[in-house]
Amino acid sequence: MITGTGGVGKTCLAADYCRSAADEANGGVDVLIWVTANTTPAVTGAYAQASRELELVPSSENTASAAEQFLNWLRLTDRSWLIVLDDVHSAGVLEGLWPPRRTAGRGRVIVTTRSRESDLAAASGHPFLSVGVFTPEESLTHLRYTLQRAVPAGADAELAGLADDLGHLPLALSRAAAYLDYNASCSIARYRRLLADRRLTLERLIPAVRGSAATNSLAALWDISVEQANQHTGMLARPMLELAAVLDGATGIPAPLFTSDTARNWLTERSKADRPVDEFDAEHTLATLDRLHLIDHTPGEGCNDAWLVRMHQLIQRAVHEHVPPGSSPDIRSQRRNAVLPAAAHALLDIWPDTGHDQDHAQRLRASARSLAIHDQVGESHPLWQDDTAYTLLFRLGTSAGESGDIAWARAHFDALCSLAHQHLGADHPHALFARGELSRWQSRTGDHAGALRTLERLEADHIQLFGYEAPETLVTRHNLAVERGEAGDGGGAITALKEVLAVRQRNGASRGAILATLHNLCYWMGVAGDAAEAASAYRRLIPLMGEEFGADADGTLTARHNLARWLGESGNAAEAVSLLEALLPDQTRALGPRHLRTLITRQSLARWQGSAGETDKAIAGYQALIPDMREVLGPDHPELLTSRHNLAYLQARSDPAAAGENFAAVIADRTRVLGPHHRDTLSSRQGHALCLGWAERPQKAVQALEDVLRDQRHHLAPEDTGTLSTRHSLAVMRGYAGAPQAAITELLELLPDQERILGPGHPQALATLEDLGRLQGTTGDAQAASDTYQTLLTQIERHLGPDHLAALSVLDKLAMWRGRAGHPREAVHFLIRMLTGTRRLVDPAHPVLSTINDNIAHWLNQADIAEQRHGR
């Protein structure tokens, strides 16, 4: 029993089997009967006709008796026979008319049906053989074999695209090939453009082939099944299909959409039911459509996933284009104007406020995008004619951006701004909201100048509409302050946020709004260079956020994450690791292991493990995280690209060649996703250049870093931290390339800029002092080196504390250069300090203590020699 939707080739398979059976070497088939078995009279008439032709009954025998004689003959004859029952609608059609299962001779039965009702299999005694659409490879072979025109060897891409356009449906492929052969001047590319034009119908684009056995249009094939489903569901089938037809049937539509309040109201209204449609009615309709192969109603891929509804794209289009007999000429546009808002509200009914399930969110976005595309056909824009249906488009854009598709989100909100202005008016709250969201995604794509312009205009409009201190205006002023920070003006961000905070406190704003401002103020204090003060502020803020929002609230958990960051940025990487290790299980419990923020915490944990010297742990963390991010977020999410960048950076020293290849791959992906001049893309180029240096090619590294720095100065803010980092890398590589004096000059120019922008205790400023001292020492200027290391020690003690591990390393180098500068007694002083600090950290038998004592003895000896020489 061959089952499948209309157009998959069930009848062709049966016919092919008949030809093969007739040609069998052992005599083939003595009697072959083909019956179009969609009604009981048709089957009875075919049996009676066969009975007469086999001379089992006289020609005058009535139909029912003749059919019965034929069935008896099938049971008793020793001749071979084959019966094809084509297009059986239901088991009831063949009640009492099934060919016998046990026969004296060799009998075979083939049944084709669009139904997958278990009653059919039970009544016939034959199992189902499900037939689906072609695979991509089968579609390509079929088109090449079917097309009569010459197809060049390089046309496979166009043919594969055409097969995708037609959903790999065999009948559609055959008819498309016939159309192309008949219209020889129409190229495959032009035909694909015609298919994409929703103003043209399937009946025109994939017409029935004149002179062929199959004379029905594609739409007519499915109309038969739709009407059958309508009869079984009280006329609910077609309205259900109308909803599904405007959603993404390929990705899968979550089945709860069809039982939502909005969907059931739609079914009630469209079917003109005499009572409200309930969930049972909707579920029964889905099951009926599934049994008739008009949809596939299947479990989701995950154990917690809701069932999904999938629908072939050509069935969707046929339903969308359906025109009942006697309808008005504009019936399609009327139906479109009604179904698009209904589908939008049904999607909103099942769209959760939080996006814990990324797969579910992706399916919702796919169907929302389908609605957005349908809304763009013509000039009416039905989603915008409804009071709130268009808000689905806002939900779509925000969800797409947060999932990583930031370039699409920016373009989407750019279009929404125009549509909102056109349909709602410039001063409508949702029109203003669209502009705010546009600025958000402009910023995320690196267009900070564009985001600032958008927000400055929005602020002016808010002030005019609501006043300077109105809550709506303060939200925009708050966002503008943050964007100033993103554009490189950390000081301006802090000043503006303090002004917003003062207004909110003065005007009695909600505690939540005040804490949100404080949260951002803490963050930008850290970005502006005062990481230690930012960490202190977060320590004070987190308990307040826990009281207001709850310990498991997203904002509270994010504040804990930021505290760890600024502790790490202030030099306390080990404490940052400890805090993140405590945060991760709380975030996993509250948000789930696949939530974006949980994944980002794992990323941060690996980052600070690397900074704390736990390189192997950090690399293992990234290697476990990256496939999880790829699965949950997709291959192009910016956070996944950041993790890949960070992993390459960690591997750069130990395996610069492999790290360079990984950086090259990240650069290619960031260029494609974020653009060539995004700060993250430029950062990866910097990392790739450093790999050249670590691979003993410092001249190449210098050239590459000079190129990166030029692009950063042209495309980023003047005081961007990425530019400062590249200046540092360039100076270091210039030193490795044999120009230490030039490197020293560049580091001396860089240091005041870092201390002004980042703060004197920032890790980048401390690293510059470290490299400056090292280069001064290698050029023989021991006095300058010792002075630089003295400054470095002072900064570490001031900002990280006198007992910080970094201070011990600096004491060692400071002692060496003070001694070489002619001050051996001072060298001994610093080494004694180092010995005291080290004894607190290691076992008394640790060899490092012996090394320090040996160095003390060496410089004591040098001091004695110097004093003796001086005395003589």
Image (cartoon, helix red, strand yellow):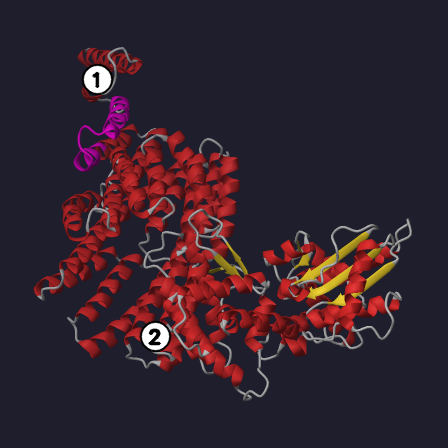
Residue 814 magenta-drawn?
A: yes
Examine the rendered structure and indicate whether residue 680 appears above or below residue 45.
above
> Which quadrant of the structure image shows residue 819?
top left
Q: Quadrant of the N terminus?
A: bottom right
Q: Quadrant of the C terminus?
A: top left
Residue at 52 percent across and 36 percent down: it is 658
User: What range is drawn magenta here?
Assistant: 793-820
Q: Nearer the viewer, residue 440 or 38?
A: 38
Kindly identify which residue carries mark 1: 839
In the rendered image, residue 492, in percent from the top left (x then y), is placed at 22, 60
In the rendered image, residue 569, in percent from the top left (x then y), is placed at 27, 41
**How far apart are the alpha carbons under marks 2 and 1?**
70 Å
Q: Nearer the viewer, residue 860 or 663?
A: 663
Residue type (three-letter) at the residue carrying disc 1: Arg
Examine the rendered structure and indicate whether residue 408 appears above or below residue 185.
above
Relative horizontal placement of residue 804, taking residue 306 as reference (left or right): left
Circle 2 residues within 10 Å: few <14, some 14–19, many ≥20:
few
Relative horizontal placement of residue 199, taking residue 146 as reference (left or right): left
Relative horizontal placement of residue 148, taking residue 296 as reference (left or right): right
Examine the rendered structure and indicate whether residue 682 appears above or below residue 605.
below
Kindly identify which residue carries mark 2: 388
Residue 422 magenta-drawn?
A: no
Residue at 43 percent across and 46 percent down: it is 629
